[in-house]
Image: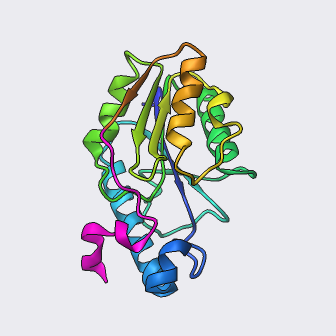
Amino acid sequence: MGEKQLLLFVKNTELGKVKTRLAKTIGAEKALYIYKALLHHTSTISAKVSALRKVYYTNFIASNDEFESSKFEKRLQASGDLGDKMYAGIKESFGERAEKVVVIGSDCYEINESIIEKAFESLSNFDYVLGPAKDGGYYLIGMKERNKAVFENMVWSTENVLLDTILCIKEQNKTYFLLPTLTDVDEEKDLGELRNFL
């Protein structure tokens, strides 16, 4: 099981500290509610994936939350920017004998277990896998060897993250596979089906 590892990077559910862009238009309490719905969805689909699953929290390791300890290992995110945090988790996984590592966040309500399984499958034939987000970033990244370069000198949460990552992969003469383009929920216009929770 440990040769395939799925890493989930999540924020602790604290009022005013999650979905801040969304909160500007719907308020902090509703934004927190939406984030909890996203966490529930991410937990549900991830639990169905055949892999060792790890959840990395921002501030503290939560107990009795959406991520059951019987299904998910729980760890703290490293310090630094998003790239530093992801790379530290990936480095840890390859140090624990992983052969394929896939990283997701908790902002994509359209992602499902088959997409994550497809990500792992694609790593049998490609060096990297990316899940493009409609905002120009990505909702998923996977690889079969650790490489810090794809996380360095990135301006996170901008429209060029995916493109810059692809250019970095090409510069290394590595191959990549693109999954379907999905929506990350950052602003009210991104809510889609999640509007039903309001």
Q: Position of residue 53 (x, y in %)?
A: 46, 44
Instruction: State whether residue 78 is above or below residue 13.
Output: above
Magenta residue check for 195: yes
Q: Where is residue 84 in the image (x, y as percent from the top left)?
A: 70, 44
Which of these two is toward me, 184 or 145? 184
Instruction: State whether residue 52 is above or below residue 59.
Output: above
- Residue displayed at 46% across by 17% down: 175
Q: In which quarter of the image is residue 165?
A: top right
- Residue displayed at 33% across by 44% down: 181
Magenta residue check for 78: no
What residue span does the magenta drawing correspond to? 180-198
Rendered-image quadrant of the N terminus:
top left
Instruction: State whether residue 2 is above or below residue 137.
Output: above
- Residue displayed at 60% across by 16% down: 172
Residue 33 horizontal side relative to residue 82, left or right: left
- Residue displayed at 47% across by 56% down: 69
Instruction: State whether residue 96 is above or below residue 197.
Output: above
Which of these two is toward me, 126 or 53? 126
Q: Where is residue 80 in the image (x, y as percent from the top left)?
A: 75, 51
Q: Where is residue 133 in the image (x, y as percent from the top left)?
A: 41, 48
